[in-house]
Amino acid sequence: GQLAGGIVRVGQQVLVLPSGWKTTVREIWTPSGLEPEAFCPQSITLVLEHDLDISRGDMIVTPDQLPGMSQEVQGRICWMHTKPLVAGRKFLLKHTTQTVQAVVTSLENRLDIATFEPTPAPSELHLNDIGEVHIRTSRPLMYDGYNTNRMTGSFILIEPGTNATVAAGMLRPPTEPARLEYTDFSI
């Protein structure tokens, strides 16, 4: 996978999310071969101390820097479709390498481009409008705020019937880090 942030080193303890498995990095493979460390935005292969089932969309993090994990997220979007966005519409949300079902539960505000002031609670967003929205996803997203990490803090909304990208968005920072029970294989 691609490193979305930070540095990973051989011997470092890591957590696999959302499963919560805790293990250690045994080897790091890059296109140049075996390396003692790797950094963002390198594409690498991690060999872990334990044989774990890690799927596309899972995240490997250090235990002291957990991302947010929630099915309820907030973000700022740019609406890019001629059909207006109204609350209650269902979409596919693509975040990092995973795509999940999502519904825009509410429109918080629309940015007035002339004054840069937010107009609270608009009934809809039109083509090229920028606004804050609340979204509920079918599975929890593991994410950071866009200002913290552009790769894990961005998303797009896709119209299910046409596969048209209808919005690009930036996630607000999570209100708290992921809370989970983890399995420590090093015991």
Image: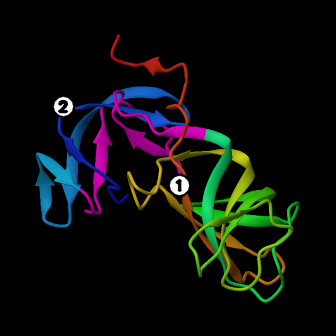
Would you say residue 170 is visible in this rendering? yes
- The magenta stretch is 40-69
With 116 as the anchor, is 104 left or right in this view? right
- Which image quadrant for residue 27? top left
Q: Closest to the observer: 32 or 143?
A: 143
The quadrant of the rendering that contains the C terminus is top left
- Which image quadrant for residue 157? bottom right
Identify the residue at image location x=42%, y=61%: 151
Residue type for callout 1: Arg
Circle 1 sits on which residue? Answer: 56
Circle 2 sits on which residue? Answer: 11
Q: Residues within 10 Å of mark 2 (few under 14, many from 20)?
A: some
With 157 as the anchor, is 12 left or right in this view? left
Identify the residue at image location x=71%, y=62%: 109
Q: Secondary structure at mark 2?
A: loop
Going from the N terminus, do you reach mark 2 or mark 1 first?
2
